[in-house]
C-alpha cells in the first residue's frame, strides 16, 4: 500500500480532468479533490470533457455517467480512441448499475460511489497510485520477460498460454488468488477462471488484439475462483513473437484490483440485478470502540479473522453464495432466493442459530481473546439490500434486540424520508423567505417576581409548519445541513432583541452541534462583532449522548466565557445530564428538567430529586432555573426550596419581539 504522504506528493504532480454536470455535486466533490490534486481541469459535460482532454495533457480522469450532450461512457469511448492508457475513475450513484459491464469493456480503472466517502477515496487513490507504478513496471517486464521473470512473479499474477489458449505456466500468486493448484491449472484452457458475467465481446476484442494485430491488450477482467467467488484483475496480455514475427505464446501479467472495485459497489450491483435476493446484513457491535481502543491494525485483523468465522459458521441448510466485507465492522451475506429451498421461517431459524454461535465465539489475535457480538438484519425480495440496511439502523437504536427480519422496511423508511424531504424543502423556503423568527419567553427572578431575562425560542411562521413541533423541525434541519443557517438567524435575532428587551437573552445550543467547526465559527464571529452585548448572552447547552469529543465542547465553553457569556445546562436531572458534567462544563446556571417540575406538586419522587439537585447545586454556587412553572403552587414550592428563577406559562408564553416592542411602547 502506498503511504498517504507519498501518494499525495505523487498526485500533486499529476493532471486531473474532472467531468460533472451537477453544480452542487461538482462543488462538493471539488472540495475533496483539491486536497490531493493541484492541477484540476473541470468540464461540465462529456463534449466539453472530450475537448479539454484533447487540448490538455491529462493523467487521470474522474467522470460522472449521466450527463447532457454526451454521457460519461460515450466520452470514455471517444477518449480511448486517442489514449488507451489514461487512467479513468467513474463516479456513480447506487442506481446506476447498468453501465457496469460497458465500463469494464472500455477499460475503466475504478469506481467511486456518490457522495464520495473520504476513506474510500483515499483507499482507491492509494491503489490507483500503486497501479500506475505497477503498470510502468509491467511494461518493462514484458519487454525483458526472460531477464525479469523473477521480478514479475514477485509483483504480478502471471500466466502463460500456448497459441490455443492452453495454460503452460502459472506463478504462485495466480494459484493463491484463484484457489487452484498448478496441477489443476496447467494443461487447461484459461476459461477455467472465466466468470459468466464477462461479456463474450471483451474476449473477442482481446483475441483480435493479441492474435490478429499481435499487439498488447489491456483491460479489467472479472474472474471466478475455484470456490465460486469472484475477483477483479487489471490484465496486460502480450503475444511473444519469434524473429519472424510469428506468435510463440502469450504471457499475461495481472494486478489484483478487487479492493478498487469497491465491495459496496459489487454488493449493490449484485442485488440490483436480482428480483429475489436473500441478504443477511451483519454489524459487529461496538466496532468503533474496538478500533479506538486497540488501534486500526488490530481492527483490520479483527475483520479479516471475523470474515473467516462467518464462513466457518455458515448455515449448512442454506449456504450463502457471497461474503462482502464492507468496512467499519459491517458484512453482507447474499444468495439468490431461488437457489435456497428453505422456507423463510426456516431461514430465520437457521440464521438466528448462526448468530448465536458467533456471539458465543471469541476471536484470537496476537494471543488476546476478543469477545464477538453482532447484530443481524435479514431480508429477501427485490429490495432486500435496502431493507436489510434499514434493519441495521433500527437495531442500533434498540438496546433490546439484536436480530430483525426487515422485509419491506425500506418502504416504511421511504415514507419517513419523503416526509423529511418535505420538511427540508419547507426549511429552505423559510430561510429564503426570512420566515424563521425568535419568540421570547420571560424568566422571572423568584425573589422579586420581576423579569430578569428572556429565553430565545425558534419559531417557523409558514402555515405549512403547523402540526410540526419546533424540536422535530430542528432535528431534521440538523440532518439536512440547514441548522447552521438557522443558528445564524437565531443569533442575529437574539442580539437584536437585547436592545429592545433591555434584558439578558438565553440562546439554546445543542452540544453535538458545537462539535461542528462551522457552528463554532458562526458563534465566535457574532461575539467578536458584538462584544458589548456578549455579557448579556447565556448559552443554554442541551446535552447529547452522541457527543464524540468533550474536549472541543470544553474549549468552546472556555472561549465564549472569555467574552463574558454565561453557560447554562438544559434539562438537568434526567436523560444524559449528570452531576459529573458540572465539573466539565463549569456552568453558571442549571435548568431543572421540566418533566420533574410539572409533577412537583403530586409526585414525591420528583420532589425529592428536585430537592437533591438544589442542595447540591447551591453548594457549588450555581444559579438555578425551573422551567414548566404552570401555576402559583409550583412557583411557591420552588421559591421555598430556594430556586432562583422560574420560567413557564404562569409568568408568560413565548411571544414575538413585536409584542414586547408594543408593550414597552405602551409603558
Image (cartoon, rainbow, N blue to C red):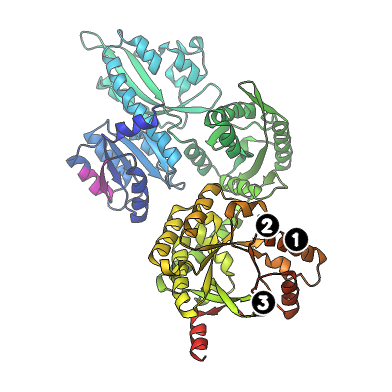
CA gap, disc 2 to disc 1? 16 Å
Q: Which residue is mark 2?
A: 575
Q: Can residue 120 be seen?
A: yes
Residue 437 position (above or below residue 511): below
Which of the labelled discs sits on residue 447, or is there none?
3
Determine contact: label 3, label 2, CB under 8 Å: no
Q: Can residue 418 be seen?
A: no
Is 66 a magenta residue? no
Whichever of labels 1 and 3 marks the residue nearer the N terminus, that label is 3
Q: Position of residue 516 (x, y in %)?
A: 47, 53
Q: Which residue is mark 1?
A: 612
Tag 3's secondary structure?
A: loop
Is 39 a magenta residue? yes
Residue 382 position (above or below residue 136): below
Tag 1's secondary structure?
A: helix
CA gap, disc 1 to disc 3? 21 Å
Q: Position of residue 609 (x, y in %)?
A: 76, 61
The region drawn magenta spans: 38-52
Amino acid at each position: 500500500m502506498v503511504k498517504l504522504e507519498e501518494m499525495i506528493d505523487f498526485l500533486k504532480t499529476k493532471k486531473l480532468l474532472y467531468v460533472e454536470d451537477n453544480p452542487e455535486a461538482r462543488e462538493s466533490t471539488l472540495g475533496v479533490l483539491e486536497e490531493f490534486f493541484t492541477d484540476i481541469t473541470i468540464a461540465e459535460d462529456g463534449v466539453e470533457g472530450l475537448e479539454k482532454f484533447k487540448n490538455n495533457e491529462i493523467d487521470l480522469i474522474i467522470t460522472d455517467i449521466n450527463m447532457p450532450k454526451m454521457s460519461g461512457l460515450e466520452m470514455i469511448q471517444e477518449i480511448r480512441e486517442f489514449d488507451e492508457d489514461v487512467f479513468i475513475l467513474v463516479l456513480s450513484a447506487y442506481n446506476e448499475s447498468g453501465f457496469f459491464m460497458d465500463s469494464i469493456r472500455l477499460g475503466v480503472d475504478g469506481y467511486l460511489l456518490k457522495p464520495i466517502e473520504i476513506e474510500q477515496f483515499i483507499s482507491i487513490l492509494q491503489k490507483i497510485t500503486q497501479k500506475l507504478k505497477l503498470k510502468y513496471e509491467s511494461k518493462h517486464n514484458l519487454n525483458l520477460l526472460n531477464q525479469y521473470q523473477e521480478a514479475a512473479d514477485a509483483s504480478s499474477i502471471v500466466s502463460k498460454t500456448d497459441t490455443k489458449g492452453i495454460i503452460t505456466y502459472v506463478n504462485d500468486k495466480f494459484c493463491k488468488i484463484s484457489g487452484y493448484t498448478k496441477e489443476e491449472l496447467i494443461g487447461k484452457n484459461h476459461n477455467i477462471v472465466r466468470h459468466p458475467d464477462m461479456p463474450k465481446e471483451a474476449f473477442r476484442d482481446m483475441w483480435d488484439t493479441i492474435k490478429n494485430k499481435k499487439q498488447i491488450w489491456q483491460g479489467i477482467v472479472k474472474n471466478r475462483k475455484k470456490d465460486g467467488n469472484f475477483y477483479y484483475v487489471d490484465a496486460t496480455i502480450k503475444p511473444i513473437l519469434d524473429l519472424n514475427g510469428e506468435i510463440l505464446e502469450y504471457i499475461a501479467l495481472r494486478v489484483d484490483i478487487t479492493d478498487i472495485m469497491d465491495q459496496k459497489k459489487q454488493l449493490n450491483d449484485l442485488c440490483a440485478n436480482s428480483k429475489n435476493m436473500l441478504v443477511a446484513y451483519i454489524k459487529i457491535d461496538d466496532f468503533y470502540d474496538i478500533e479506538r481502543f486497540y488501534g486500526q491494525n488490530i481492527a483490520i485483523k479483527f475483520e479479516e479473522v471475523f470474515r473467516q468465522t462467518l464462513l466457518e459458521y455458515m448455515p449448512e441448510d442454506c449456504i450463502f453464495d457471497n461474503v462482502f466485507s464492507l468496512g467499519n465492522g459491517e458484512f453482507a451475506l447474499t444468495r439468490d432466493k431461488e437457489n435456497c429451498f428453505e422456507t423463510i421461517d426456516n431461514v430465520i431459524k437457521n440464521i438466528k442459530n448462526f448468530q448465536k454461535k458467533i456471539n458465543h465465539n471469541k476471536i484470537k489475535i496476537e494471543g488476546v481473546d476478543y469477545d464477538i457480538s453482532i447484530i443481524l438484519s435479514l431480508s429477501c425480495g427485490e429490495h432486500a439490500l435496502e431493507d436489510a440496511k434499514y434493519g441495521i439502523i433500527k437495531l442500533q437504536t434498540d438496546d433490546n434486540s439484536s436480530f430483525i427480519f426487515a422485509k419491506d422496511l425500506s418502504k416504511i423508511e421511504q415514507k419517513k424520508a419523503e416526509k423529511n424531504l418535505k420538511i427540508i424543502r419547507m426549511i429552505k423556503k423559510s430561510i429564503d423567505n426570512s420566515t424563521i423568527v425568535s419568540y421570547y419567553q420571560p424568566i422571572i427572578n423568584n425573589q422579586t417576581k420581576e423579569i430578569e431575562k428572556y429565553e430565545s425560542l425558534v419559531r417557523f411562521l409558514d402555515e405549512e409548519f403547523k402540526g410540526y413541533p419546533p424540536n422535530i423541525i430542528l432535528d431534521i434541519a440538523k440532518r439536512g445541513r440547514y441548522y447552521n443557517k438557522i443558528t445564524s438567524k437565531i443569533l442575529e435575532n437574539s442580539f437584536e432583541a437585547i436592545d429592545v428587551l433591555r434584558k439578558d437573552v438565553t440562546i439554546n445550543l445543542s452540544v453535538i452541534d458545537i462539535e461542528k467547526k462551522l457552528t463554532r465559527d458562526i458563534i465566535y464571529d457574532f461575539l467578536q462583532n458584538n462584544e458589548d452585548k456578549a455579557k448579556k448572552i447565556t448559552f443554554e447547552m442541551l446535552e447529547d449522548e452522541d457527543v464524540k469529543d468533550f474536549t472541543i465542547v470544553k474549549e468552546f465553553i472556555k472561549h465564549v466565557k472569555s467574552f463574558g457569556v454565561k453557560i447554562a445546562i438544559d434539562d438537568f436531572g434526567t436523560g444524559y445530564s449528570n452531576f459529573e458534567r458540572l465539573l466539565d462544563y463549569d456552568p453558571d446556571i442549571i435548568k431543572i428538567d421540566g418533566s420533574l417540575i410539572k409533577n412537583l406538586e403530586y409526585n414525591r419522587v420528583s420532589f425529592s430529586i428536585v430537592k437533591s439537585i438544589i442542595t447540591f447545586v447551591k453548594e457549588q454556587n450555581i444559579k438555578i432555573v425551573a422551567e414548566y412553572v404552570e401555576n402559583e403552587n409550583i412557583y411557591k414550592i420552588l421559591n421555598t426550596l430556594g430556586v432562583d428563577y422560574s420560567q413557564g406559562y404562569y409568568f408568560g408564553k413565548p411571544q414575538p419581539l413585536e409584542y414586547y416592542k408594543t408593550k414597552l411602547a405602551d409603558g
